[in-house]
Image (cartoon, grey):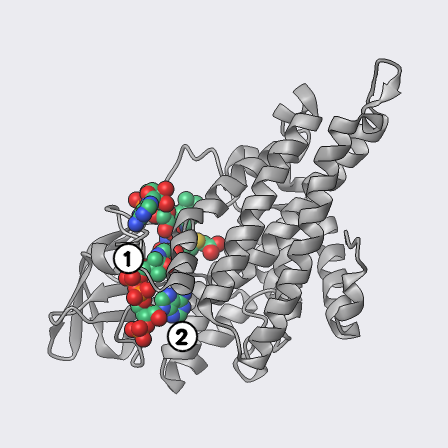
Amino acid sequence: MLDYYQAMELFSPEERQIQAAARKFLDAEAMPHIREWWEEGTFPRRLIRAFGEMGFLGSNLPEEYGAAGVSNNAYGLIMYELERVDSGLRSFASVQGALVMYPIYAYGSEEQKREYLPKLAAGEMVGSFGLTEPDGGSDPGGNMKTKAVRDGDYYVLNGTKMWITNGSISQIAIIWAKDEEDKILGFIVPTDTPGFSAPEIHHKMSLRASVTSELVLEDVRIHKDYLLPKSGSLKAPLSCLTQARYGIAWGALGALEAVYSEALDFAQSRITFGRPIAARQLIQDKLVYMLSEHTKGLLLVWKLGNMKDAGTLKHTHVSLAKRNNVRVALVSARLAREILGANGITTEYHAIRHMLNLETVDTYEGTHDIHTLILGRDITGENALT
Ligand code: TGC
Ligand code: FAD
């Protein structure tokens, strides 16, 4: 692992072992095929059970529900390794763990936890998370049109969710909807319920090795037992986003390592005007930017993980790390593409695939600018969001 400051010394032997095992598995099972999956626009469904066996799914949740029960730093290192291959693989695991298992764990009943968490952890069941709607995702509370109307022991759900990762391959969807009193409730919706459909979104130039779908709910009638009983406000889905953003802050550094290593290798062997381009100051400047940002970012997420384990983490701390690490990874991917010259525009190399993926990562889970405004509000007390 790229580690200029020997930050891995800060991690426990178990955490280092988890990182090494994840890398070994992914280098064997995913790295050799990722280009093909991305070009074909397919997510490798055959890896889902293997991800479960490797403990990649909701790994920081407790063992009593079938998860691996590892530290938040170990969880972060797994996200790092997944995204070193491709943001789409990390997205799959982020959604399954942080956006499906976590809301069931935090807002579900004991019966719901026992029913769903072990299957989700094992990769026997896939979930999706429907918060964003077609009218815009940055203001999920204000823009939410999806309705849950109580009818005896049932709720009737109507609405449309947009840009939903894993949507068409999920057996359950966590759906956020407003009730008659405008309270935001979360539901576990089995995707075979009549009235539910999940058309896949095509023509993406980013996150191509990930399934993205629309979720359409037309008079979807589900029993009240599927309500997440501890949900009841926007805070519930937002707290899930904090979990996913935490993983993204780690994952982006994996993508940064991938593009940096590739660009460095290329620069050392590409000869122009009689010398390797690595000998040129302009190229070195780009490589040093990447290395510096990776080094700072790694220390940042290590500290973030410790704060999460200690329970001192605020969601604004996570906003800072997500905003920073994704943007420096995106800038680095563009620089790596530039160092590769014309070769950089092909998927023979990883840079442009990561670059295009990171455009999504910079947008989802709160855009770069939305995190700027979240942080600006926190430090000034002035709300520039509304
Ligand atoms: P606001 O007043 O800020 O918040 C309402 C209440 O919630 C609290 N809160 C949070 N709690 C936990 N985690 C967070 N991240 C939280 N953000 C806010 C807040 O303290 C407040 O609590 P209280 O006690 O005062 O009531 O609500 P707002 O309507 O002003 O929200 C604005 C904003 C910008 C914070 C929020 O809506 C936002 O984060 N927008 C971005 C939406 C977003 O990130 N969507 C992601 C959808 S999922 C996705 O993209 C998955 S991608 C797949 C993958 O991860 O790989
Ligand atoms: P908008 O909210 O319409 O914003 C458009 C632009 O306006 C942005 O640049 C934004 O920064 C800016 N803007 C908005 N408000 C302000 C403001 N107050 N001040 C200044 N600028 C502002 N969502 C889910 O619920 N579940 C998923 O699984 C999921 N997966 C996704 C997968 C992919 C591949 C993608 C691309 C998106 C996914 N999303 C998912 C949706 C994602 O969270 C949203 O795209 C994101 O929250 C932004 O919403 P939007 O695209 O509607 O942009």
> Within 10 Å of the Cα at label 2, are there few (<14), some (14-19), or many (20+) other Cα atoms?
many
- Is 81 located above or below residue 240 in the figure? above
The residue identified by callout 2 is 104
Let me know if residue 274 appears in the view: yes
Image check: 81 left or right of 322? right
The residue identified by callout 1 is 140
Residue at image coords 51%, 65%: 317
> Which residue is at the far top?
273
- Mark 2 and mark 1 residues within 8 Å of each other at the beta carbon: no
Q: Quadrant of ligand 1?
A: bottom left
Let me know if residue 208 appears in the view: no
Q: Secondary structure at mark 2?
A: helix
Q: Secondary structure at mark 1?
A: helix
Of labels 2 and 1, earlier in sequence is 2
Residue at image coords 39%, 62%: 380
Front residue of this view, candidates 345 and 315 = 315
What x and y, as percent, mark residue 369?
A: 41, 47
The quarter in which the C terminus is drawn is: bottom left
Image check: 199 left or right of 337? left
Q: Which mark is residue 74?
A: none
- Is 126 located above or below residue 201 in the figure? below
The quarter in which the N terminus is drawn is: bottom right
Image check: 316 left or right of 175? right
The image quadrant of residue 54 is bottom right
Nearer the viewer's eye, disc 2 or disc 1?
1
Front residue of this view, candidates 251 and 102 = 251
Cα–Cα span, label 2 and label 1? 20 Å
Asked if the beta carbon under badge 1 is closer than 8 A to the nearest atom of ligand 1, the reply is: yes
Asked if the beta carbon under badge 2 is closer than 8 A to the nearest atom of ligand 2, the reply is: no
What x and y, as percent, mark residue 146?
A: 20, 58
Residue at image coords 22%, 78%: 224
